[in-house]
Image: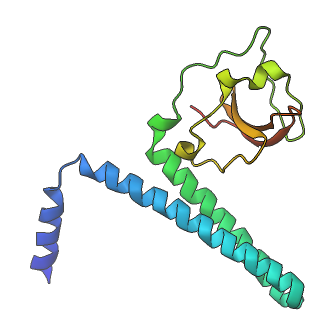
Amino acid sequence: MRKMIMAALAASAMVPAVLVPVAAQAQSAREVRDSERDLRRDQRDLRQAQRYGDRHDVREARRDVRESRQELREDWRDYRRSNRDAFRRPAYQGPRGYAYRPVAVGYRFQPTYYGNRYWVNDYARYRLPHPGRGARWVRYGNDVVLVNMRTGRVLRVYNGFFW
């Protein structure tokens, strides 16, 4: 048994270092997708428990949803940590008179702050959810903000998103 373990370790040492990060990245992205799927399943189970179950079923389903959300956050953080270069962007230059102030959901941006110059077009690369109709992911300082393009209202905020 010991010889087999030593042979496996020796074989893994011969794998080029270039292949390891690619495999780790693919595994991490797959884990995030699996966690998203599990979360959707648990949310569906919660809706079904609220419709047809008793209090115990609803409480258990809520706990499952909470645990799935936590796992998804952890998988996303692991992905972000292993792909640090993807989250490095050039320094942010806001519109004239720009001064950073933290924003929250419901805040209303002026149109110059969410113009096409600030759009995050490749949101899937950053594992951001699909923005939906009439909304866009916008860079604001080192934050990423989901903005309703018609009203300028903030729908979701990820603070400290970029390094």
Q: Is residue 94 left or right of residue 15?
A: right
Compared to residue 138, the image places residue 100 above or below, namely above
* Horizontal and vertical percent position of residue 124: 56, 46
Q: Quadrant of residue 2?
A: bottom left
In the image, taking residue 15 as reference, residue 152 lies left or right, namely: right
* Colour convention of the picture: rainbow
Left or right for 19, reference 85:
left
> How many labels sit on residues?
0
**Which residue appears farthest toward the top when viewing the image?**
96
Q: Quadrant of the N terminus?
A: bottom left
- The quadrant the C terminus occupies is top right
Give the answer, above or below, for where 13 lies relative to 123: below
Q: Please tell me which residue is depicted at 18% across the width and 50% down the height of the picture.
A: 16
Q: Residue at x 40, y 52 (%)?
A: 25
Residue in front for this viewpoint, 23 or 137: 137
Up-down: is 11 above or below 112? Answer: below
Residue at (61% x, 64% y) in the render:
36
Residue toward you, 5 or 121: 121
Of residue 66 and residue 132, the one placed in the foreground of this image is 132
Q: Is residue 24 left or right of residue 109?
A: left
Q: Which residue: 73% across, 48% down?
A: 132
Q: Quadrant of residue 13?
A: bottom left
Q: As drawn, which residue projects farthest toward the front? A: 133
In the rendered image, residue 154, in percent from the top left (x then y), is placed at 83, 38
